[in-house]
Amino acid sequence: MNGENNRFEVEFLKEAFEFIQNLDSKTREKVLENIRISRFQNNPKLLKKVEKDIWEFRTKYMSNQIRLLAFWDVNRNSFIICSHGFIKKTQKLPIKELKKAKRIRREYINKMK
């Protein structure tokens, strides 16, 4: 975008990849476009820190709030890992989704050791 360097690379774990694949094509395009834009621009409407080590890619499309939870790979500079995705039904981030992202992050870090 405008010759700027991207701020980070994005990697999708299996569950996040499958979530995106199962979205309808227009929604999938919007989600991927927002992720691409967030790699070049610091915009909390697209990528927001939700807790110490957990971030969320945010997409609002039609009447859906699509979320992909993610964390930074501590062993690779400027890599963010998407753990999984869901369609948000309420204002607050569901605790079970946050716990799931933390568990996946822990497993990922342990596997990389």
Image (cartoon, helix red, strand yellow):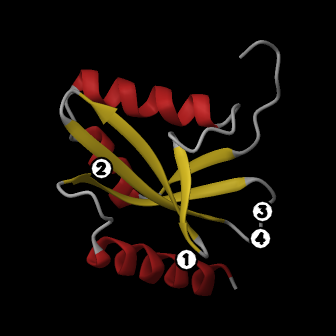
Left of 15 or right of it: where is 8?
Answer: right
Residues tagged 2 and 4 counted as in contact (Cβ below 8 A): no
Dot 4, how many residues are within 10 Å of its Cα: few (below 14), some (14-19), or many (20+)?
few
N-term-proximal mark, 4 vs 1: 4
Which amino acid is tagged 3?
Arg
Q: CA distance from mark 2 to mark 4?
A: 25 Å
Which amino acid is tagged 4?
Asn
Image coords of residue 97 (percent x, y) = 31, 71
Say what secondary structure mark 4 lies in: loop
Dot 1, how many residues are within 10 Å of its Cα: few (below 14), some (14-19), or many (20+)?
some
Location of mark 4 (residue): 75
Q: CA distance from mark 4 to mark 1?
A: 11 Å
Residue at the front extreme? 91
Residues tagged 3 and 2 counted as in contact (Cβ below 8 A): no
Say what secondary structure mark 3 lies in: loop
Q: CA distance from mark 1 to mark 2?
A: 18 Å
Location of mark 1 (residue): 108
Location of mark 2 (residue): 18
Q: Give the residue at x 60% y 73%.
A: 53
Residues tagged 3 and 4 counted as in contact (Cβ below 8 A): yes
N-term-proximal mark, 1 vs 2: 2
Image coords of residue 3 (percent x, y) = 82, 15
Number of numbered labels in the structure image: 4
User: Residue 76, which numbered label?
Assistant: 3
Q: Quadrant of the C terminus?
A: bottom right
Image coords of residue 31 (percent x, y) = 39, 34
N-term-proximal mark, 2 vs 4: 2
Left of 85 or right of it: where is 3?
Answer: right
